[in-house]
Image (spheres, rainbow, N blue to C red):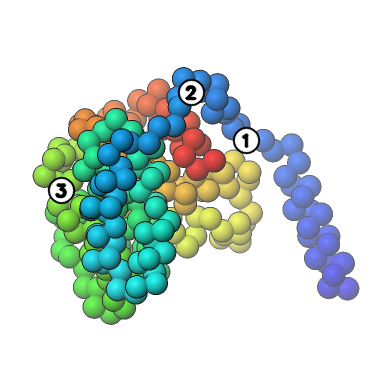
């Protein structure tokens, strides 16, 4: 009897999805001239700066070795191959730190608002274990550098996207929420938030030393550009 009920529910769920669509653009048509190239200084910067940074902040030797082997900075080095190498390292460090924030979301929200904007106070992280504390504190020097070289408006844009991403963790990527199933479009939009793609895009002005304002990202053409770029990153 229970299996029959479950089967009926599954049929109803599948039926509710019929006819729903979501538009996914062709990346090759959007960016036909783009070719992936590795930043020419990346390997030296990784060996001299990024890997030592990991070893400073990851106390578990096996974990640190695995992170170095993962070579996660390569993504940033391909994403913006013509920028200054130290900005590549800061960006790679940001990508690393963001994904460690899930289990202590509220403290992370407070931390990033304080680190990027100087608002509020540094949260007390003493209740978390050493690895979770380091997952945020490894960002201290990165956030300090961003505040030094970026305008307040640029920091606000980056902080807003950071808070949106961290605030979405644990609930945005779930299929069933608030006793309702999302539409295909709603789920697709939520999936984009959880993938942190807008956080990645928000680093581009910093990487190239360009100031950006909230009014800039509200322009419809800019919103379309960010949306298409988000597909490019997480697909």
The vertical placement of 54 against 130, above or below, is above
Tell me if I can see residue 98 in this picture. Answer: no
Q: CA distance from mark 2 to mark 1?
A: 20 Å
Residue at coordinates 21% horizontally, 30% vertically from top-left?
210
Which residue is the site of mark 2? 31
Task: Give residue 187's position: percent from left, percent from top.
Answer: 58, 47
Q: Residues within 10 Å of mark 2 (few under 14, many from 20)?
A: few
Q: The N terminus is located in which quarter?
A: bottom right
- In this rendering, would 61 be left or right of 233? left
Residue at coordinates 27% horizontally, 71% vertically from top-left?
133
Which residue is the site of mark 3? 145
The quadrant where residue 226 appears: top left
**Element on which disc 1 rests:** loop
Label 3 or label 2, whichever comes before in sequence order: 2
Task: Give residue 235's position: percent from left, percent from top.
Answer: 54, 41
**Element on which disc 2 rests:** loop
Task: Give residue 177's position: percent from left, percent from top.
Answer: 57, 59
- In this rendering, would 94 be left or right of 174? left
Residue at coordinates 54% horizontally, 28% vertically from top-left?
27
């Amino acid at each position: 009897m229970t299996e029959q009920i479950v089967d009926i529910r599954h049929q109803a769920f599948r039926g509710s999805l019929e006819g729903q669509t979501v538009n996914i653009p062709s990346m090759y048509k959007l960016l036909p001239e783009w070719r992936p190239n590795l930043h020419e200084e990346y390997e030296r910067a990784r060996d001299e700066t990024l890997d030592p940074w990991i070893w400073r902040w990851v106390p578990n030797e096996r974990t640190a070795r695995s992170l170095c082997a993962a070579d996660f900075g390569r993504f940033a080095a391909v994403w913006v191959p013509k920028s200054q190498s130290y900005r590549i390292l800061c960006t790679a460090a940001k990508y690393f730190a963001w994904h460690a924030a899930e289990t202590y979301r509220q403290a992370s929200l407070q931390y990033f608002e304080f680190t990027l904007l100087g608002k509020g106070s540094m949260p007390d992280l003493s209740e978390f274990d050493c690895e979770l504390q380091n997952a945020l504190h490894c960002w201290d020097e990165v956030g300090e550098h961003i505040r030094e070289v970026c305008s307040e408006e640029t920091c606000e844009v980056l902080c807003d996207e950071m808070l949106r991403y961290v605030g979405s963790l644990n609930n945005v990527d779930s299929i069933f929420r608030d006793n309702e199933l999302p539409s295909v479009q709603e789920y697709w939009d939520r999936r984009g938030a959880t993938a942190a793609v807008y956080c990645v895009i928000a680093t581009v002005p910093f990487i190239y030393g360009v100031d950006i304002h909230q009014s800039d990202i509200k322009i419809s053409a800019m919103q379309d550009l960010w949306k298409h770029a988000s597909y490019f990153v997480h697909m």
